Amino acid sequence: MSLWLPILVSAVVVFLASAAIWNFLRYHDSDWRKLPDEESARAALKGAAPGHYSVPYAESSAERNNPEWQDKYRQGPAAMLTVLPHGSLAMGKQLTLWMVYCLAVSFMVAYVVSVTLPAGADYLRVFRVAGTVAVLTYAGAAPMHGIWFGQQWSATAKDILDGLIYGLLTAGVFGWLWP
């Protein structure tokens, strides 16, 4: 029960830090590029249901081994594309899910620190354990986007930086509010 305060405070701090990064620092603005003929691409995607797509598409590894598919891939373009639901620009659902994720990370940090360190542990010991868990959680999966999905490494590095910031903030809150 004594861990609910650091769980809640760290989740809110990370949520606010992410809002500052995305709304004020805006260093992620360069993570996306404009297509050469955006209007033609929009017209071609008209009617595509929300989801993940790949071009050229192969339904199976056997199809990817087909010389015709491999030739299409070599000639390009090759792309992985996410089609989002269209309509409202409201971000309520995403923000709610992000807050739930922040709470889940903080809960897991609380669990690991509580089974690793006793109550009354000094700030630096709590900071190290909480920071390790939080950085691994917030930043650990970011390289997969560069490795498997072709995300630019500059964008991946910014995602890792975000995770480092969120992890250190979480560690600071846990060190400060550790029972």
Image: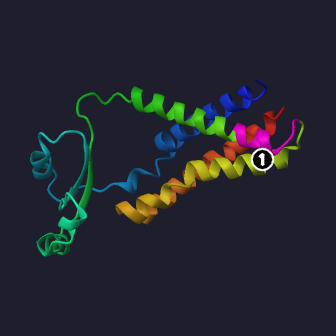
Residue 85 image offset from top left, x and y in percent = 25, 35
Residue 21 image offset from top left, x and y in percent = 52, 44
Label count reads 1
76 to 95, vertically: above or below: below
Residue 126 image offset from top left, x and y in percent = 80, 45
Q: Is residue 126 visible?
A: yes
Q: Residue at x 56, y 35 (%)?
A: 15
> What residue sits right under mark 1 in the picture?
127
Drawn side of residue 54 relative to residue 125, left or right? left
Mark 1 packing: few (<14 Cα in 10 Å), some, or many (20+)? Answer: many
From this viewpoint, which residue is outermost toward the front?
62
Kind of residue indicated by mark 1: Phe
* Magenta span of residues: 110-119
Drawn side of residue 55 relative to residue 30, left or right? left
Residue 173 image offset from top left, x and y in percent = 73, 38
The verdict on residue 115 being magenta is yes
